[in-house]
Amino acid sequence: MIVAAIVVPIVFAFYFAGPGIGVAVGALVAVGIVYVAVRLRPEGEIGSTPASAGRPRVLVVLADRLEEPEPVERVSSLIKNAGDGAEVMVLAPAHIGFLDRWASDVEAARRDAQQRLVVSVAALAAAGIEAEARVGDEDFVQAVEDQLGSFPATEVILVSGPEDTTRAARELRARLRTAFHQVVNGPAAR
């Protein structure tokens, strides 16, 4: 059915309007296919079902710095509630701008993500939480999905600003097989 929807307009354009129009219709169909392919997002579940045996693992995803006392306390409390000896991975997706992506200029975004990691891991260390750190993909959901492939977390915590990542939080809440928490930094935390 899909193949017919692609081929039939092109064939009719060639047959009734000639090769020039046929090629133009073919190009429009190709653009339509690319547009639909780009807009498609995976909708399956993310991560595997957490194993009941072994150490708990917590993935902390940073959309915002984790440095103010109240958000640090909430995150450390969630980590401690996950279980004794929880392994913690802190992930900072690189915020890459549209023009930077096209110019392949990602160094500033990676540097900013690394700075968020250093500040946040230091704040967690001051709260008694030992953690590893990684820079991830610019898309929060993709970054979490990638990281869960090598670090199967039992819980995911998203640290964001008041208006940041609402789409990502909704999608993670819907697709994650593991427990999901969101800690929102207040306006004073910025």
Image (cartoon, grey):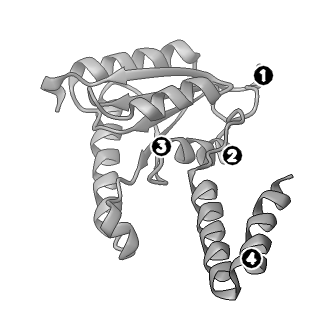
Q: Would residue 168 be found to the left or right of residue 144 on screen?
A: left
- The amino acid type, in three-letter code, at marker 1 is Ala
Q: Residue 28, located in which quarter of the rendered image?
A: bottom right
Whether residue 93 appears in this view of the structure is yes
Distance from the alpha carbon under mark 2 to that under mark 1 = 18 Å
Task: Quickly name the residue at label 2.
Answer: 149
- Crowd class of label 1 (few under 14; some 14 to 19; many from 20; radius 10 Å): few
Mark 4 in CB contact with mark 2 (< 8 angstroms): no
Amino acid at dot 3 = Phe
Q: Which mark is residue 140?
A: 3
The kind of residue on which mark 4 rests is Phe
Mark 4 or mark 2: whose residue is earlier in sequence: 4
Q: In the rendered structure, which amino acid carries the disc numbered 2?
A: Gly
Q: Which residue is mark 4?
A: 16
Between marks 3 and 2, how big is the CA–CA gap? 14 Å
Give residue 53's mark. Answer: 1
Residue drawn at x 66%, y 82% as measured from the top left: 23
**Number of residue marks:** 4
